[in-house]
Image (cartoon, grey):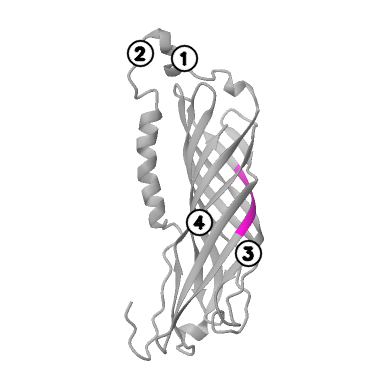
Amino acid sequence: MLHLPGKKTSIENAPPWAAPRQAVRILIAIFPLWLAADPVLGQKIPSSKQNFYGINQAEYENRIMHYGFFLALHGTHYNLRHSDQFVNYKDSVVAITPKNTNGFGLGFIVNYRFARYFSVRVLPTVSFYTRDIDYAFQSGRSATQSRESTNIELPLLLKYQSERRDNVRMYMVAGIKGSVEANTKKKQGGSERLNVLNKDLAIEYGAGFDLFYEFVKFSPEIRFSHGIADLLVPDRNVYSRGLNRLTTHTVSLYLHFE
């Protein structure tokens, strides 16, 4: 981006529902996977192999408790709001730009079904994130504030599932997620740095497919997470004074095995 001398450029955030480019590629990858795995779309074969193409785990719904594990790929960035000092051209920073970065996570599934189509899911998770913000100064200098963290997360989600069609059904989830940083690495030089709180609270929602196989239920899922807690520590250094609010935004691909 080109900045004219003495003129400040305010970088507007993407709207909260806008996913990182990584998530678009994830969505494109999911549909071939689903088409390949869907027994309904597959060619029927003789009854000698009916266990694979028939109704797998027909007694699955008779149990109200289910357990499993999952892997997750994250695309994440900070959402920010500029301060009046930045907007009114009183700061040496001319641009503040949050970057899209990647992360991953893994955890366990505890699913309690309390009605035919509704379940409560608790998902203890360990996630690894890197979040970056780029700064451009009037002098032409640039700097990046980077925060690498290991987070302990506890999503609590309500799951609504459709009627099962052979070995496939769709579902939606929504709920909240609390998280705390267990370990943080800050990568920037100098004595001044952007400080953020180590606890976060987010709302989450998403959708996915339950694919029933003979011995496992595999569920690919896309989930959006919007931080509602302001993480900004209001220091008056050059990296903080241009900001008024700082929250997280994450789009994730989850692969569940139950």
Can you tell which mark lies on residue 184?
3
Describe the element under mark 4 as helix, strand or loop: strand
Going by the numbered disc 4, the residue's amino acid type is Thr
* Along the line of sight, the residue nearer the viewer: 18 or 258: 258
Labels 4 & 3 near each other (Cβ < 8 A): no
**Mark 1 vs mark 3: which is more N-terminal?**
1
* Along the line of sight, the residue nearer the viewer: 217 or 129: 129
Q: Is residue 1 left or right of residue 107?
A: left
Labels 2 & 1 near each other (Cβ < 8 A): no
Can you tell which mark lies on residue 131?
none
Labels 2 & 4 near each other (Cβ < 8 A): no
Label 4 neighbour load within 10 Å: few <14, some 14-19, many 20+: many
Q: Which residue is mark 2?
A: 45
**Mark 2 vs mark 3: which is more N-terminal?**
2
Label 1 neighbour load within 10 Å: few <14, some 14-19, many 20+: few
Describe the element under mark 1 as helix, strand or loop: helix
* Disc 1/disc 4 C-alpha distance (Å): 39 Å
Label 3 neighbour load within 10 Å: few <14, some 14-19, many 20+: some
Magenta region = 150-157
Is residue 147 positioned above or below 23 on the image?
below
Describe the element under mark 3 as helix, strand or loop: strand
Spot occupied by residue 9 in the image (x, y as percentages of width and height): 39, 81
Q: Which residue is mark 4?
A: 250
Labels 1 & 4 near each other (Cβ < 8 A): no
* Disc 2/disc 1 C-alpha distance (Å): 11 Å
Spot occupied by residue 85 in the image (x, y as percentages of width and height): 51, 86
Q: Is residue 71 left or right of residue 1?
A: right
Q: Which residue is mark 1?
A: 51
Residue ID at (49%, 52%): 74
